[in-house]
Image: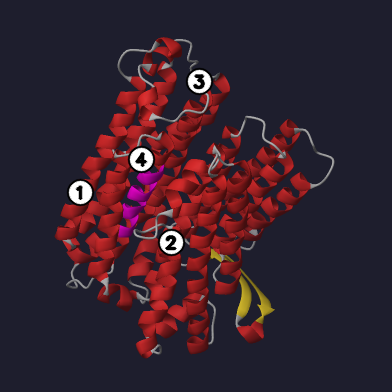
Amino acid sequence: MNQFPFLTLLTLVPLVGGALVLAPGREHGKTVRFMALAIAFLVLALAAALSLFFDRTQNGMQFVERAAWAPSLGIQYHLGVDGLGLLMVLLSALVIPFALLSSSAPVANPRLYYSLFLFLEAGLFGTFTAQNFVHWFAFWELSLIPAFFLIKIWGGPRRTAAAVQFFVYTTAGSVAMLIAFVALYNATGSFEFSQIAETVRDGRLGRAALPIFLGVFLGFAVKTPLLPFHTWLPDAYAEAPTGVSMVLTGAMSKMGVYGFLRVLLPIFPEQMRALQTPLLGLAIATIVFSAAAAFSQNDLKRIVAYSSINHLGYCLLGIFVAVQWAEDSAASANEKAAALNGAMLQMFNHGITASALFYFVGLIEQRSGGSRDLHYFGGLRKAAPVFCGLMGITVFASLGLPGLSGFVGEFLIFKGAFALAPWAASVAALGLLLTAIFLLTILQRVFSGPLPENWRAWPDLTNAQRLTAGPIIALIFILGIYPRLLTDLVNPTALAILWPNL
């Protein structure tokens, strides 16, 4: 089945589907939404089939597709996935239908709204499967355009400013990365990620390696985001519609971390080692300061937005500790592998828990008439016990409670970090405490205490909403109890990234 063009279909189906949804003659919102959902679930089925035929014992690219594009310029159509790529494909394929199901309220111009969702999905798949920079960069940028318009047209009162800030920041990072890769092409004669990595490891870049590294680093740091390049994110997440916020945090934010693992670490390991201390400082700042910022917010959506930055900081901590020089021993090798495995697991687990948190916050906003103020609620557990229970599970998963999905990734990251960089792990652990405080504050302020008179008629989750959240809640338990479903998938890739010559 490796010869079947799974990866081309994964990208082509939502592209064609988005065009079909956008075609004239489909003005009824429910019909358009049904079509978009059908296409998203078809893509999910393709991603599930891809995972079934994926050989988890191999550490190289699988389902490889190649075709000449512009060979004189080193550009070719080159697709492939390893454990990391498949993990991101599965995450995107899960988050998109979840977000579409959450978009049940009527929207203006539904054809454009749902077609942009599908175009965004195509951009995600193209980014996570392309192995040639030009091909990859085209989809990297393709994902930016639908996200901008989804925020700009259907966002909240400050949507224009949030969308423009999002566009300017990410475009600036993309321009810096494009310039850096043009320099890499001039030095190596290739746009293939694997060939560039092999050439750069031979020392061909010389003194140009550091400025080129910084250009690529900036593109991924903005997208993740890493402090201090994060200021676009809270406004974009808070102003975006609920479904769009779910995709932004659940899948799009992983593009930056994916770039660190797929591009930056294999091509520039020496530069990352040389700058490890400042990189660890940035990761710690991302963890601790974003958690402190979340604690100071009253807007539920902004709290979850800063929480997203905080959790992605753990991913970067795992990546940055894994690049350091360490004595060549089995113990240090195991700790590096643990940290990198934890970073990959955290990417997936954060994607599902953060998107679920935005879903529940969106329901609170919808039922309260637009309010997201933390102090505006209280006692809702009495009126909506199922709502409280499911959101509580998601909150506990997000803060890393053992037995739920969020625990395993954070445990592996800190296991590796305490062994390889104990000072960094010790400071970053403060973020765990702050994360627990602000997440538990949500449960306390929203669901505990006396029930105000104006919320006594607050409705619990409908059957449709329970069915929407149910699979994600089940996945949180499954991955918390049996994390080998993911660790067996990503461990060969982690080993290949750390020791490419083995």
SS under mark 2: helix
Residue at (65%, 52%) from the top-left corner? Answer: 119
Considering only order in the chain, which callout, 1 or 3, is on the residue closer to the N terminus? 1
Distance (Cα) linking label 3 and label 2: 37 Å
Residue neighbourhood size for the residue with mark 3, other residues' Cα within 10 Å, grouped as few (<14), some (14–19), many (≥20): some
Q: Nearer the viewer, mark 1 or mark 2?
A: 2
Most foreground residue, 233 or 347: 233
Considering only order in the chain, which callout, 4 or 2, is on the residue closer to the N terminus? 2
Residue designated by label 4 = 405
- In screen coordinates, is 88 left or right of 271? right
Kind of residue indicated by mark 2 = Val
Residue designated by label 3 = 461
Distance (Cα) linking label 3 and label 1: 35 Å
Kind of residue indicated by mark 1 = Ala
Expressed as whole percent of the image width and height from the top left, the position of residue 429 reads: 20, 49
Considering only order in the chain, which callout, 2 or 3, is on the residue closer to the N terminus? 2
Distance (Cα) linking label 1 and label 2: 24 Å
Start and end of the magenta stretch?
305-316
Q: Nearer the viewer, mark 4 or mark 3?
A: 3
Residue neighbourhood size for the residue with mark 4, other residues' Cα within 10 Å, grouped as few (<14), some (14–19), many (≥20): many
Q: Nearer the viewer, mark 2 or mark 4?
A: 2
Most foreground residue, 39 or 47: 39
Kind of residue indicated by mark 4 = Ser
Residue designated by label 2 = 222
Distance (Cα) linking label 2 and label 4: 27 Å
